[in-house]
Image: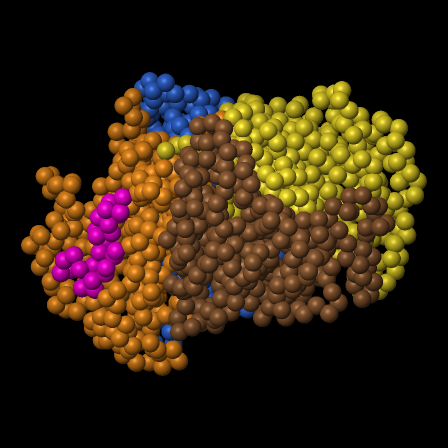
Chain colours: A blue, B orange, C yellow, D brown
Amino acid sequence: MNNSFGDIFKITTFGESHGKALGCVLDGCPPGFVLKKKYISKEINKRKPGANRYVTKRKENDNFEIVSGVFKKRTTGTPICFLVRNTNTISSDYNNIKNIFRPGHADFTYYNKYGIRDYKGGGRSSARTTVSLVIAGSIAKKILKKFFNINFFSYISSIGSLKIILKNNINFKKYFVPNVIKSKYVNNFLNNVIKTNDSVGCKISLDIFGLVPGLGDPLYEKLSANISKSIMNLNAVKAIDIGLGKTCSIITGKQNNDLFYKEGLLSNNAGGILGGISTGKDVNINVYIKPTSSIFLKQKTINLKAKEQHIKIKGRHDPCVGLRAIPIIESLVSIVLINSILKQKINSFY
Amino acid sequence: MNNSFGDIFKITTFGESHGKALGCVLDGCPPGFVLKKKYISKEINKRKPGANRYVTKRKENDNFEIVSGVFKKRTTGTPICFLVRNTNTISSDYNNIKNIFRPGHADFTYYNKYGIRDYKGGGRSSARTTVSLVIAGSIAKKILKKFFNINFFSYISSIGSLKIILKNNINFKKYFVPNVIKSKYVNNFLNNVIKTNDSVGCKISLDIFGLVPGLGDPLYEKLSANISKSIMNLNAVKAIDIGLGKTCSIITGKQNNDLFYKEGLLSNNAGGILGGISTGKDVNINVYIKPTSSIFLKQKTINLKAKEQHIKIKGRHDPCVGLRAIPIIESLVSIVLINSILKQKINSFY
Amino acid sequence: MNNSFGDIFKITTFGESHGKALGCVLDGCPPGFVLKKKYISKEINKRKPGANRYVTKRKENDNFEIVSGVFKKRTTGTPICFLVRNTNTISSDYNNIKNIFRPGHADFTYYNKYGIRDYKGGGRSSARTTVSLVIAGSIAKKILKKFFNINFFSYISSIGSLKIILKNNINFKKYFVPNVIKSKYVNNFLNNVIKTNDSVGCKISLDIFGLVPGLGDPLYEKLSANISKSIMNLNAVKAIDIGLGKTCSIITGKQNNDLFYKEGLLSNNAGGILGGISTGKDVNINVYIKPTSSIFLKQKTINLKAKEQHIKIKGRHDPCVGLRAIPIIESLVSIVLINSILKQKINSFY
Amino acid sequence: MNNSFGDIFKITTFGESHGKALGCVLDGCPPGFVLKKKYISKEINKRKPGANRYVTKRKENDNFEIVSGVFKKRTTGTPICFLVRNTNTISSDYNNIKNIFRPGHADFTYYNKYGIRDYKGGGRSSARTTVSLVIAGSIAKKILKKFFNINFFSYISSIGSLKIILKNNINFKKYFVPNVIKSKYVNNFLNNVIKTNDSVGCKISLDIFGLVPGLGDPLYEKLSANISKSIMNLNAVKAIDIGLGKTCSIITGKQNNDLFYKEGLLSNNAGGILGGISTGKDVNINVYIKPTSSIFLKQKTINLKAKEQHIKIKGRHDPCVGLRAIPIIESLVSIVLINSILKQKINSFY
């Protein structure tokens, strides 16, 4: 019942996995801003299925339409509506789950919440809905980069039990996942997951650089709190670290405190946030994502009448859903950052 | 710049560590509810300093006044203002930090954010401000228990590197911390922390039972997201797990999926939340808290003009600030839960 | 920069007069509700141009598409997106106003606000955007009628200086405007307005019946306040009365006070609202609408560079824009009422 | 159930007429601002009872305490809590209304809404609660004047049927009401109202000057809409005009349209607002206030069990409650204006 996110720079999204279309309305985008479809498409492609053999083979034709808010290629300050038509949906894949609940999925909880459920492709609970986030987020990221010089460096830091070590000579311009999965070890690991009809979780690390000190609004709109909320709203996320995160609970104050030098903070155990406000150092976040819930093994479950039965899921599903999560997480965090910046700018008005 | 929390059941808090008073305005409390000062006092005492040798020796006279919203002992539906006068403040303890930033504290970020800073006791960034949360939260908890039969079982699951094992014969009625620190091992551990003028982090585990399925509002007000936000707003929290949390990122779908039986879900790896909505199983959360930033060792820092110097912190500080966090975390989560319940009830109106 | 309206039952609208499409996203509609396109179409037709000779001849093809939120004809609790494609737009009508400001219009203020302006048909400031309100409002009205037995009786109570007297034998089932303009006097009056290339204002009266006592949330979300805000958001509205309205400022307390009898209030000078909360009597509102700003007379104005010039407006414009306002006003008020009801229901939870 | 007002510059108020204290929490006040108690006191005194024989003789000791948010006389960016203790309350005046509803008052609606009612002095529905608005509003007005050069000229334009004509040589520095009631005609008129144990309504006119063009956020946070809402939230207000208001409904487009000249708009029928956005001309508003509900005549009413009886109201009540409304209305509008300005400033960030 709540599909809006952000307050000044605000999106309202809509659409289901197998419905007519998905999209979002973006309110609060600056007027006069040149909106290039090409740039947005590039971001969408990063999360797009079908990019390699480890992501679902569903081909999403993510051609989007800009319905409103742009006049002669420039934003006008009025709400921008984006529309992405659903194509290549094979709804028949879902007939067998019409009356039963898939383990690990939101089927059971949606049904209990609303008393009704769009079972085709998971309906509104599908990760397919994140395409709306990436569209709006790509604009947010562009604004952060262009006006505030804020950039992301994000990567998959582990896949299941496999730790990914970034090489020194990493090519920042290339997108990371293809690089990662070109590795023979990663390849073998994922192939094995597929072969066993199972799936696997992963960990994503974000490094956000360029933030000025002072972002975040205590007591209850802290930067750490809003970033956490935004990421926890993403399907399959089950844990978050800020800075040292979990580790700081087992060390001492002396080990944990970042000391101030005239050059600023040299260490960054706090992950760029103190008292819920940015310190000006990089913001470091770890996101822990559970394994894809759709596995091809036979599983125990119940139907709508609580009768036990078995389920064998069909369809096209990623062995590791987290492999496509980076552009979505960056989108969510970007929207938080823009709003934090705009609110902080207000202090300088007077 | 934002000191309100919650939407239907909503609090607005105010006050600084060494100011005249702290307090909160609670809007949305049901009318006709009997408000007992005694019950609130009991909850406040749980977070109160001075309770044992491991929490700060500052004696807070947490006598509070109910300023409005109650008529002949019953709530009237109008806003309830609570006021807690500050006493036993020794502001002179803070004269030496007037112009310098304490490592690990919010001094630097508040100064950068607002251009001005109340340095006495940390001002608004002090954990002292959580007294307002506990007052409002105690009412929220009472409502959850009385009307919805929702209860918390929370405990400190580790202190620094020391894992706390709950005994089978734990007395649920007694408050846990005294029990924990009665243990000789814990005692020795904390004494050693104090002796070395250092501090230590800890981990807190929450088990919330009694929730019906269906709470939480996708896509962007998920139960998991709002609980995470609320807890991340608490000073010193740096990481959160829901259910298996971090662990689910290293296991497989088969290991992680909770299966449905006619009795319901038997396992609870999801921590009671699927698709951001409660499943009806207990909600399990781990909270990771950093070590107290105020340590009594000499530390490197800078002053307001970025000149390097050393600081030696005075005052009365907990060796492990997390030891007092449970009633505060329960308060924050309770406010989230009440709002989720009320929003879900709306579906049944029509 | 704000295109959302309502909080629990909430719409977010988008679209410009001559853009690709207009529409809205409705969040908070009850799940399981049967959504009939036919009913919505009927409501849209009431505000539709081209219905008679006194409303603009622009033929709007208000065929709308339900993009999301409905599964097998029922709402699912997820956001419902409606899309209305723009057709029959003659943008060339607006080339001559590209660089100048039309008197009485929002051209000047939008340009000053955003620094950029979609001049085609007034862009986002056009009354065309109200189609989104009527779609969402028609659902709100249906819910009010079906679940809460709340109905509207609204009529045009004056056109310019011409007072409209409701006949005793008024046919409530027929829509009022055709009846009104069938009158010879009204006909002659409006014909004369057209002949002189001028326009005229009007007054609309609403009578809302069926409200229970207790709706509205003091102190700052009073029913009177939210109804006023909603109506004042409609283009061309310049004044509002609640109950006796303006008149109560010139009479005495004895004349104004409604007395209580065992049957309830017999008089209703307060217009159904006391202390910002519904009394259970009909809510009576008068809305005062200014004359259509687009008149066909030559008028003095300036261009973007503040150089004086004359303008002669082309296009298709109503002589009295208020004649089409009733379904829109009822929509706005319906959304306010649903939200007030849902909020009040919350009191009965505990 | 909602006692917050404003979004960036936001107040949360609390307190009842005969409770312990009233007050408000102000969030979003700029940090570093020098807060002078003296200035606030001056504003409070303008609405204070007891100022002359035509306002209630209840002597309110409006000494207020600044509880938080100010450090060494400057605001710190943290929430500012103001507290005004209630004194000189004669609750026994209200024992006779304990079980009955006063005509024209909110007694009946509060009872129906909340099922419980603080009958002493009207509890939360009392105009006494406006003291909180005036405190926060005085700061808002100061900021508007100091940083944005925005000023108010407000006056009582009629009392009952008596029209007040402003003299040319009006002394802007002196407060207007004393001037007005020094007039023999006004004196005689009000004396007669008192003599007959009756009360009378009035009309207040506001002229706000200094606004830049561009304030207000279409479509649903228009300046006109938010100003109307804010004023309609004030007790006893029943109608509002913006610019020509009601009059524009009876004239023609030619008569109503303000034409653009190179010097700007010369006429101001629109009252400084077009399309919901400020034009830069003065904003003109008329507010219509009903007669004081408390009259000393015997009136028909019912008790809590709907049994008919008579009531004769005791206590100290103004013959014309509107005579004290100006500082309150200016406060409400000031809070709207500050928020509109801050939101509009955001456009210039990028």
Above or below for D8 versus B245: below
**In the image, is C263 to the left or to the right of C198?**
left
Q: Relative to the observer, which residue lies in front, A281 or D44? A: D44
Q: Toward which corner of the image does residue C325 lie, by quadrant?
A: top right
Q: Residue at x 36, y 81 (%)?
A: B307
Q: Residue at x 23, y 59 (%)?
A: B61
Above or below for C148 versus A249: above
Q: How many marks?
A: 0
Q: Return the residue found at the far front.
A: D195
User: Magenta includes D172?
Assistant: no
Q: Return the residue found at the far right.
A: C195
Q: Residue at x 77, y 54 (%)?
A: D269
Bounds of the magenta span? B36-63
Q: Residue at x 42, y 59 (%)?
A: D84
Q: Relative to the observer, which residue lies in front, D51 or C54? A: D51
| Residue D305 spot, x, y in % from top left | 44, 28
Q: Relative to the observer, which residue lies in front, A258 or B104? A: B104
